[in-house]
Image (cartoon, coloured by chain):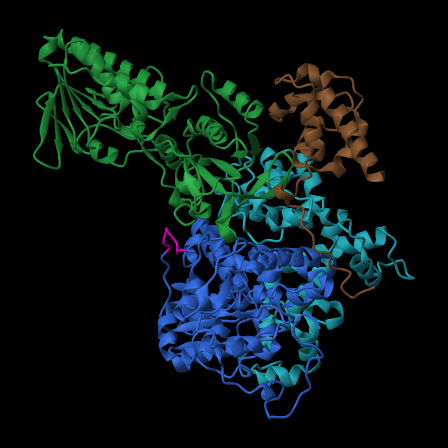
Chain colours: A blue, B brown, C cyan, D green
Amino acid sequence: MKNSQVNVTKEIADDNYFYLRSCIRQNFFPGAENVFLDILKNKLGKNIIDNANHTSCTGIGYHSDIVPYETYQTMVARQFALMTEHGFRNAAVSCITSYGGYHEVLETWKEFPEEEAKARKNLKNATGRCFEIPENISHSCDIIYRFRHDIAELAKYKLINKQTGKPLRIVDHIGCHYAKIFPDKGVGGAEKNTVLSAVVEAWGGESVDYPERRHCCGFGFRHYLVKNNRSYSISNSKKKFESMEPYCPDMIVTNCPGCNMFLDKWQYALAKIEGKTYSGDKNGIPVLSSEELAALVLGYNPWDIGLQMHQVDVEPLLEKIGFDYNPDEKYLDANGNFMGKPEFIGCLD
Amino acid sequence: MSQFDFLQPKSRQIEIEQFDDRILTYVLEREQSFLTCISCGGCTATCSAGNLTSFNVRKIGLSLRRGNINDLSDEVQKCMFCGKCTLVCPRDINIRNVVLLIKKGIAQLETEKTL
Amino acid sequence: MRTMMQKLREDVRLKEGLNACMGCGICTAVCPAAEYFEYDPRSIVVTVQSGNEEKIRKLIESDTIWMCGQCMSCKPRCPRNNCPGLIISVLRRVSQETGAFVKSRLGRQQYLILKTIGTNILETGYCVYPASVVPETHPEQGDVWKWIYDNKEAVYERVGANLDKEGPGAMRKIGRENLDELERVFAESGGQTLFTSIVEYSRAYAKESGFVDANGQPDMEKYTDFLLNEDNDEK
Amino acid sequence: MIDKKHIAIIGGGIAGQEAASVLTGLGYKVTILEKNERMGGMLNKWSKLFPDFSSSQLVLDAVKVATDKNLNVICNADIFSVQKENGRFKLSDNSSLDVYADAVIMSTGYNLFDATLKEEYGYGVFENVITSADFEKVHKSGEKLTTADGKAPRRVAFIHCVGSRDAKTGNTYCSKVCCITGVKQAIEVTQMWPECEVFNFYMDLRLYGSKYDALYLEAQKHHKIQFIRGRLSEVSERQGKELQLKAEDTLQGRPLRMKTDIVVLLIGMEACKQNEDLCRDNALELDENRFFKSKNIYNHRNSSTQSGVFLAGSCICPMSVNESLESARSAAMLVDKSLKVQER
């Protein structure tokens, strides 16, 4: 697909970030967050702070409605207060739900100053803290997008199939709360979002369009949280896989921790239920976040960045790129001792 | 019982390609006027059965067009064939006959199935 | 007594989410919930717009408002700049504040979510916490997750995380002083009130439905079991 | 004294020409200032007219003003300033052209909505998404509508309200003519390809004109064109350039997905961009939709907010061909009346 006709230009801060972690990413892909910090600090020479005092923004609670909006605003205000106290004005957000949430709160405050006053009062009474409105809120994928060419220059690998010499065919999935709530806050806007496709192309891959590209992965908050509701979630992911299947993608790239997890796990669950995969093999389509993809092209050890934590095996992808890695280290702990391995990896036996 | 029984992927999205148009074709061959329905709901407003039950004639027409044969077969049973719908239709469609034909069409499909 | 409409209007999100609806269906067209449930965001907006007290009351007592997955796919498409997803949030708030949520199966699940996510938030500072993603109740998480779960310390350490330990890092232990602050934020801003409201209405409903212990008090364990297995009409 | 009075008409489309022909008939001196190379305006782009499929050429020929000693036509004149000087109007374009007139008629017409702005519909990205204007071009050429790779379409979907009644594009008004255009073009597709299935996705069918509803009935009855009430939410491309649509079947309350070979976007009418320039040096005003504001929309629809400047055709609001012609004639009569009052 050609890029956006209506270019959404978005401000992305270029240094001095306050990192705000994601509940889901820390839980399922903690290596992705660590390597993101490492790339920024040690490859790009940026200043980014990882603060021990920030907590969940409670966004999952907010969207599953057990956390009221007033509380959510105050929690967001607390993160801003920590930034202010450390002298930071730029937030680097790992989670897409938080990212959308911070913007939602800021927009509310713009429209309804009395809500901001309330949040300030609540925060002051509860914690004694004060805050300034951040100058810039960017998602980690924005920052990777901004430095995609710098990363390309430092890259050890390209997103090219080493055997055929052809670019890898990569489909993307953009987390809904990245640009659907505020289209001008996402690179390329809500409809023809380019934040991931530009990254893929900058690193030598081919960004492949598919009809259900803009469809939700199906998290649905309360629908995944309650076991009996999960059919909603898997049904929507299935819709996406069916739509990708004819394009034979080599991988899926995501910017949202939740989507990354669901697209990985639901392939497995669908294989168990339907006895089929959407990848043409038994493994499934590997799903990587933009952080993990950046780390791969930069040549990080896949087991340092946590790729052994994916259900769909990433090794076939590493092989395609011609990545120099040691499969025997996949299940070694920090001291080099074998820590056992999953009973089963991939989707189908 | 599998540990995945709690997951039942499905979609209720209408897929036009998957319409079962056998009944629609049957009806249109015999009652061409149905083509001109504009879904105004005049029929439903006056319907004798509809005033007593959840029966909705306008929706029968839609189900027919969208090929929802399963919905149709139960629904048409509720019609009392009073014919008031036909009297009020602004497009002069013989709605009573449409419902009658749906019944016949479904019966015919059933017979074909058993044969 | 305040009318339903007044209660809804007190929320700024209703002002943000509802301008005027012309019933075009552009929201339902891309709604993941509409594809899965007997659900139509357009008709919810039309009901709220009508201001009909009776209809709105029925709505907040129904399963319908709990079907939205909050993806907000409806937001960028609406030709009148409405946001059905935001209107739903407001309906859900009022449903929980008034106790209407216990009248529907999906609404009653708020108790389950409170018990999992709510507890996680207050006790750990995270919405999701590895120890709470139990493989038995999350079979879809697969064998790799089971392996991670069984070898949490080693795996998280291997990938550079700081599971349950002091200092910064992924999945670090969030310190007591921070959790205290979080708790005070909840107390100050209505979060605690909502928790209490969900619990109290659920207890009353549990009692009413006969989930009681030997002393005639609500037996919330039994009730939780009931909620976990409550029949899914969709199946 | 009439023959001493000079009237300038900005815009040589059908409204401008019709007004000119009435005024020269009354004996006035008239200058038409047309920004393009040729006269006729937007109608040049249209093939057949609703509701009776007359050729647009018929109208174009009929409005062509007979060569008249009192008529002066200047093409390539892109007027950007209208100033009142000593009781007369001075009209200037970017070159050295200055025209002086006792009264001015604005007949600047409309622009077509730029469909690329509706990104989710994929115009300019997917080859098989075209606009109603593109369809007219095909029809006018005498060719049949085909997919980008030259195949006969098995299914065509017409999408109503593209760039109309849409806060997202800034056009909250109804363009009025697209509904009936959709019905007309749908019939034309079935005339080209009798086997082709044709759908219309609409919110309301605003078939307001005489004989329009009859065309709707004909479309259903004789051409088996199907109408689905639901606004299109998105178009995406499948393999082989086939398109996929998502809308709600609102009468059923269910989301609907459909494959189609071609999508035709019924694009709305927008005010001309240069209307803003034309307001700069005088008391002319634009309305909330950026069309020229009338003194009042009931009995002074053809009077602008600047005395001596009159409005004709779709620079006032979206209009069909016959409304535009009627509007032009009434603007001309108003000019006549006002100049005669001045005289006395």
Of the pair D43 and B82, the residue shown nearer to us: D43
> Is C115 situated left or right of C31 in this image?
right
Of the pair A330 and A86, the residue shown nearer to us: A330
Q: Quadrant of residue D103?
A: top left
Q: Is residue A88 visible?
A: yes
Q: Is residue C158 above or below residue D188?
A: below
Is residue D217 a member of the stretch shown in magenta? no
Q: Residue at x 73, y 68 (%)?
A: C139
Quadrant (top left, top right, bottom left, bottom right) of the C terminus of chain A: bottom right
Of the pair A90 and A176, the residue shown nearer to us: A176
Q: Residue at x 76, y 30 (%)?
A: B105
> Is C29 situated left or right of C215 in this image?
left
Q: Quadrant of residue D290?
A: top left
Numbered range of the magenta stretch: A2-8
Q: Is residue A54 above or below residue A339?
A: above
Of the pair A313 and D331, the residue shown nearer to us: A313
Q: Is residue D162 above or below residue C200?
A: above
Is residue A4 a member of the stretch shown in magenta? yes
> Is A180 situated left or right of D272 in this image?
right
Image coordinates for residue B15, horizontal then vertical, percent? 63, 44
Q: Quadrant of residue C186?
A: bottom right
> Is D295 situated left or right of D23 in this image?
right
Magenta-drawn stretch, dominant element (helix, strand or loop): loop
- In the current view of this chain or complex, which residue is farthest to the top? D344
Image coordinates for residue D207, horizontal then vertical, percent? 48, 23
Q: Residue at x 36, y 57 (%)?
A: A9
Quadrant (top left, top right, bottom left, bottom right) of the N terminus of chain A: bottom left
Image coordinates for residue A199, horizontal then vertical, percent? 42, 67
Q: Residue at x 37, y 59 (%)?
A: A10
- In the current view of this chain or complex, which residue is farthest to the right? C214
Q: Is residue D189 above or below residue D62?
A: below
